Image (cartoon, rainbow, N blue to C red):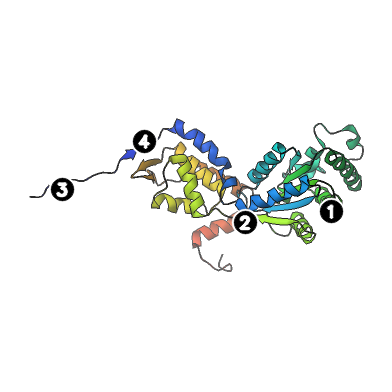
């Protein structure tokens, strides 16, 4: 008679309180993962500004790709390096306010002489040119403007003119957009590229980068089932962070046999909420198309949808 012994893999229970610092860390982690080439481009932008030459870097990527984190990371590096940093962000409500996204360039509160003719685009261009020139005379300047797909036409007009007019001064421009094709921001980016701006795209994170994110939080790489679930985020850093954070919040992962293993097949509430927020920004027709596509499957003819 042969006595057989079954050896069960050791399972490690994860303490949620210990996971919180790791979860906070992955919010900025996508900036460093698989972004080395893009960071070299912004490093070169700052280097040229320190040497007295202006330049423009354009950042594109789908919503959640990490554009805002990338801009904040670059702005923090520039500030540590002695730059004067002016960072603004466009948004849907601010689109109704002329030059809303550019107001941080002027400081808070706005200097009184900037309020004389707030709706005159040519007046703003002239004043901003003088103001940025004065700042650049003391230290190199980095102007960051995020989410330009929401920007008003007046802001687009300013950004169309000033980077070229200030190219001989130490003023660097870091501009980002996403959103549908055909808007004013896309046309602006095309024109700036024609004049020498460098465009970088924040692409999807690859499987290795996803493994690093999971390992950072849970202390072990994902098993096959966990990796397959993470692949459903299509390398989107925001969705991946929500997935990993949601699984941790709900205690749905344990470490077993040297791998992070799912203990629940249910999608975390945080992912559902993030998806709901994304859908809420779409038109009724776009949402209807997505519902139809979910019913007919991953492959279909547009005519059928």
In the foreground, 271 or 10: 10
**In the rendering, which numbered label is found on residue 286?**
2
- What kind of element bears circle 3? loop
**Which residue is under mark 4?**
13
Residue 240 appears in the picture as rendered: yes
Q: Nearer the viewer, mark 1 or mark 4?
A: 1
Horizontal side, residue 47 vs residue 127: left or right: left
Badge 2: few (under 14), some or many (20 or more) residues near its Cα, within 10 Å? few
* Lower sequence index among marks 2 and 4: 4
The residue at the point 49 percent across, 40 percent down is: 245
Q: Real-space Cα distance between discs 1 and 3?
A: 78 Å
Q: Nearer the viewer, mark 2 or mark 4?
A: 4
Mark earlier in primary sequence (1, 4): 4
- Crowd class of label 3 (few under 14; some 14 to 19; many from 20; radius 10 Å): few
Q: Which residue does the numbered mark 1 point to in the structure image? A: 164
Q: Which residue is mark 3?
A: 4
């Amino acid at each position: 008679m042969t006595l057989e012994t079954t050896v069960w893999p050791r399972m490690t229970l994860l303490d949620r309180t210990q996971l919180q610092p790791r979860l906070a860390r992955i919010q900025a982690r996508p900036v460093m993962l698989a972004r080395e080439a893009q960071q070299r481009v912004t490093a070169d932008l700052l280097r040229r500004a320190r040497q007295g030459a202006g330049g423009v870097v354009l950042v594109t990527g789908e919503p959640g790709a990490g554009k805002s984190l990338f801009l904040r990371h670059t702005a923090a590096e520039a500030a540590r390096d002695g730059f004067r940093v002016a960072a603004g962000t466009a948004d849907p409500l601010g689109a109704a306010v002329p030059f809303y996204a550019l107001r941080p360039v002027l400081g808070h509160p706005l200097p009184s002489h900037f309020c004389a003719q707030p709706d005159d685009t040519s007046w703003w261009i002239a004043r901003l040119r003088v103001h940025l020139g004065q700042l650049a005379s003391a230290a190199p300047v980095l102007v960051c403007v995020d989410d330009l797909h929401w920007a008003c036409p007046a802001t687009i007009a300013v950004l169309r003119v000033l980077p070229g007019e200030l190219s001989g001064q130490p003023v660097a421009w870091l501009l980002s957009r996403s959103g549908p094709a055909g808007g004013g921001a896309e046309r602006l980016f095309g024109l700036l590229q024609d004049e020498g701006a460098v465009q970088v795209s924040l692409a999807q994170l690859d499987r290795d980068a996803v493994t690093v994110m999971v390992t950072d939080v849970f202390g072990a790489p994902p098993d096959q089932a966990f990796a397959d679930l993470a692949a459903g985020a299509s390398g989107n850093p925001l969705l991946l962070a929500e997935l990993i954070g949601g699984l941790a919040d709900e205690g749905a992962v344990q470490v077993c046999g040297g791998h992070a293993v799912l203990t629940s097949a249910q999608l975390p509430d945080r992912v559902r909420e993030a998806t709901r927020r994304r859908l809420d920004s779409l038109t009724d027709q776009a949402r209807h198309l997505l519902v139809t596509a979910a019913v007919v499957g991953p492959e279909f003819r547009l005519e059928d949808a």
